[in-house]
Image: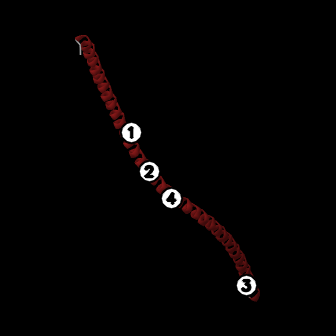
């Protein structure tokens, strides 16, 4: 190979070597950036998994609280029915008490009238 052709070929080889080095460095930098993005995405995925686990536990707690609430609501309904029944019973007892009170007053009046009649009878006999 002549000297004239060797030098341009050497320059071309040098340029090609430089382009290969530049391309390799560029590819390595891109690979590093891709690895960094992958690492960040993996951290994000891990964080999201932890959040999902936490939310799942919170939902479990909400389910338990909802069951307790339903139980309390049932107890309140039962207590309301009991209260209504007791109020009816109380009214009936108050009505009975009023009737007994009226009967007692009638008996007392009758007893007074009987006493007056006995007293008059004794006075007539005397």
Say which residue appears at 60% left-offset and 64% top-offset: 83
Mark 3 vs mark 4, CA separation in Å: 75 Å
Residue 91 x/y as whole percent: 66, 67
Query: Which residue is situated farthest in the top direction here?
Result: 4
The residue identified by callout 4 is 67
Residue 118's disc is: 3
Quarter location, residue 105: bottom right
Q: How is the image coloured?
A: secondary structure
Say which residue appears at 24% left-offset and 14% top-offset: 6
Mark 2 vs mark 4, CA separation in Å: 17 Å
Q: Earlier in the sequence, mark 3 or mark 1?
A: 1
Q: Nearer the viewer, residue 86 or 73?
A: 73
Mark 2 vs mark 1, CA separation in Å: 18 Å
Identify the secondary structure beneath mark 1: helix
Q: Earlier in the sequence, mark 4 or mark 1?
A: 1
Residue 56's disc is: 2
Tag 3–tag 4 contact (CB < 8 Å): no
Q: Earlier in the sequence, mark 3 or mark 4?
A: 4
Residue 44's disc is: 1
**Which class describes the residues within 10 Å of circle 2: few (<14), some (14-19), or many (20+)?**
few
Which is in the foreground here, disc 3 or disc 1?
A: 1
Which is in the foreground here, disc 2 or disc 4?
A: 2
Query: Which residue is situated farthest in the right direction here?
Result: 124
Residue 19 x/y as whole percent: 30, 21
- Where does the N terminus fall, quadrant-wise? top left
Q: Earlier in the sequence, mark 2 or mark 3?
A: 2
Quarter location, residue 13: top left
**Which class describes the residues within 10 Å of circle 3: few (<14), some (14-19), or many (20+)?**
few
Q: Horizontally, is 61 left or right of 26 in the view?
A: right
**Which class describes the residues within 10 Å of circle 1: few (<14), some (14-19), or many (20+)?**
few
């Amino acid at each position: 190979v002549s000297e004239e052709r060797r030098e341009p070929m050497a320059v071309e080889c040098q340029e090609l070597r430089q382009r290969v080095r530049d391309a390799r460095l560029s590819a390595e930098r891109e690979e590093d950036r891709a690895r960094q993005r992958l690492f960040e995405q993996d951290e994000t995925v891990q964080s999201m998994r932890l959040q999902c686990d936490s939310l799942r536990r919170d939902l479990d707690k909400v389910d338990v609280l909802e069951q307790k609430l339903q139980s309390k609501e049932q107890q309140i309904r039962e207590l309301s029915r009991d209260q209504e029944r007791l109020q009816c019973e109380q009214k009936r007892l108050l009505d009975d008490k009023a009737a007994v009170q009226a009967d007692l007053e009638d008996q007392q009046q009758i007893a007074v009238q009987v006493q007056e009649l006995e007293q008059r009878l004794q006075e007539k006999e005397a």
